[in-house]
Image (spheres, helix red, strand yellow):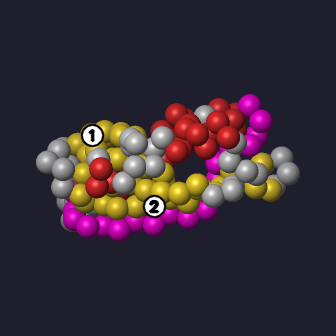
Amino acid sequence: MKHLEVTIKIDWSDLDVYEHVNNVSIIRYLQTARVNFWELSGLYESYKKTNRGPMLVSTTCNFKKSIFYPGTILIKSRVAYIKNSSFAIEHIILNAEGVVFVQAKDVAVCFDFNTQKTFAVPQEIRAFMENYSSNFNEI
């Protein structure tokens, strides 16, 4: 099993008055990882072609340590679970030394924007997701 990774350079504009990365910036980092996952899985392409795709319904974020400028962060993402129409992606944000700064989880549903109803996770996307369901301890 594997996970997805995204590396992001910390920008000066990501900082707050305390001179560490603002919590809002961290949420944007997580969005980058989530959208990367949606693009690679085919969910975004499905949305563009059919108006059926992922909809974020919940996100949680636990801030473990402050992140400071300058530097880069690494976001590792894995699938926590896949249900009929919903799925969850867990993320950890680490620095170059492998220290975990953030733990987060997104829950999304497959949503048909034409009918305003959920639909089952398509089999080909489910198969993709199953390849990314490793435990972070295995990473």
Kindly identify the residue that appears in the image at 36 percent across and 54 percent down.
135
Residue 2 in which image quadrant = top left
Residue 55: percent from left, percent from top: 64, 53
Q: Residue 30 in magenta? A: no
**Helix, strand or loop status at disc 2:** strand
Residue most extreme to the right: 115
Nearer-N-terminus badge (1/2): 1
Residue 7: percent from left, percent from top: 31, 39
Please tell me whether the stretch drawn in magenta is mainly helix, strand or loop. Answer: strand
Q: Which mark is residue 105?
A: 2
Q: Where 112 falls versus 62 (above or below)? A: above
Residue nearer the viewer, 121 or 59: 121
Magenta stretch: give its range.
49-67
Tell me which amino acid carries mark 2.
Lys
Q: Is residue 69 visible?
A: no
Q: Nearer the viewer, mark 1 or mark 2?
A: 2
Left or right position of 99 against 23: left
Residue 65: percent from left, percent from top: 22, 65
Kindly identify the residue that appears in the image at 80 percent across and 56 percent down.
117
Q: Disc 1 and disc 2: Cα gap in Å? A: 21 Å
Q: Which residue is mark 1?
A: 9
Residue 124 in which image quadrant = top right
Q: Is residue 39 visible?
A: yes
Left or right position of 24 against 64: right
Residue 127: percent from left, percent from top: 58, 40
Residue most extreme to the left: 97
**Is the C-beta separation of discs 1 and 2 under 8 Å?**
no
> For the image shown, how many numbered marks are present on the structure?
2
Tell me which amino acid carries mark 1.
Lys
Residue nearer the viewer, 14 or 87: 87
**Helix, strand or loop status at disc 1:** strand
Q: Residues within 10 Å of mark 2 (few under 14, many from 20)?
A: many
